[in-house]
Image (cartoon, rainbow, N blue to C red):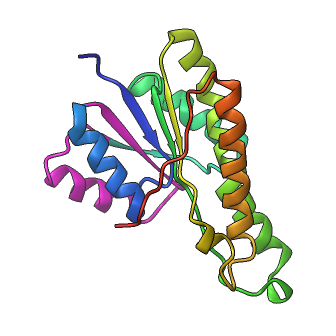
């Protein structure tokens, strides 16, 4: 069986950790958990996951909301581990506030992390997947309930837009993408 390299953005959060564990146990692929640069819990997270027997899990620092930072991160992953074959766009944040009380900076941070990050990371890995003739991209979105939840003004629209982008990607990539529900562990 071919060993693959999987990249999970926001890989050290609740859903991200569960995804990393599942991918690492499924077929022995190398799994790279993304986190922000200088994330304080990176080493302890990695130590805990490896103590659980997942020696094939790695960490990669990069700000997925920043296109250049993602490019640098992907280059490091490709150099140190190998080309990304599986991408899970999981990064997501919430700024719990009503729209009229939210700062423009909070709005932009949520949109950049939850929506634009999927473009940023996908753009850096999809050409290689196409060249190699194999790749998987999974975008973690949300439920309709969360999209319209009170005090989730930018979160809901950002995830709805990501779901729409997934539908467009499904058409562009000849039906290779489709939505599937996920519940947080």
Residue toward you, 140 or 118:
140
Q: Is residue 12 visible?
A: no
Q: Is residue 69 left or right of residue 153?
A: left
Q: Is residue 101 above or below residue 88?
A: below
Q: Is residue 133 above or below residue 6?
A: above
Percent across and percent down for residue 103 are: 82, 80
Residue toward you, 86 or 61:
86
Which residue appears at 31% of the width and 60% of the height?
A: 45
Percent across and percent down for residue 65 are: 68, 52
User: In which quarter of the view is residue 114 placed?
Assistant: bottom right
Q: Is residue 40 visible?
A: yes
Which residue appears at 54% of the width and 46% of the height?
A: 179
Percent across and percent down for residue 142 are: 57, 62
Q: Which quarter shows the N terminus?
A: top left
Q: Is residue 184 left or right of residue 152?
A: left
User: In which quarter of the view is residue 108 placed?
Assistant: bottom right
Whether the magenta-drawn stretch holds residue 10 is answered as: no
Percent across and percent down for residue 153 are: 75, 76
Q: Is residue 158 left or right of residue 10?
A: right
Which residue appears at 68% of the width and 51% of the height?
A: 162
Q: Which quarter shows the C terminus?
A: bottom left
Whether the magenta-drawn stretch holds residue 43 is answered as: yes
Which residue appears at 64% of the width and 24% of the height?
A: 173
Residue toward you, 66 or 130:
130
The magenta span reads 29-57
Residue toward you, 147 or 35:
147
Q: Is residue 75 above or below residue 89?
A: above
């Amino acid at each position: 069986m071919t060993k693959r390299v999987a990249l999970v953005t926001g890989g050290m959060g609740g859903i991200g950790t569960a995804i990393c564990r599942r991918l690492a146990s499924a077929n022995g692929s190398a799994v790279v958990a993304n986190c922000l640069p200088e994330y304080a819990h990176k080493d302890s997270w990695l130590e805990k996951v490896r103590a659980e027997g997942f020696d094939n899990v790695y960490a990669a620092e990069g700000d997925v909301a920043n296109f250049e930072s993602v490019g640098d991160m992907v280059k490091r992953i490709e150099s140190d581990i190998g080309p990304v074959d599986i991408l899970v766009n999981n990064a997501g944040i919430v700024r719990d506030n009503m729209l009229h009380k939210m700062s423009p900076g909070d709005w932009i941070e949520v949109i950049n992390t939850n929506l634009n990050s999927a473009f940023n990371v996908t753009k850096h890995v999809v050409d290689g997947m196409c060249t190699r003739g194999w790749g998987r991209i999974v975008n973690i979105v949300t439920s309709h309930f969360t999209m319209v939840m009170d005090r989730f003004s930018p979160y809901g629209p950002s995830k709805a837009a990501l779901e729409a982008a997934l539908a467009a990607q499904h058409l562009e990539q000849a039906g290779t993408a489709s939505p599937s529900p996920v519940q947080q562990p």
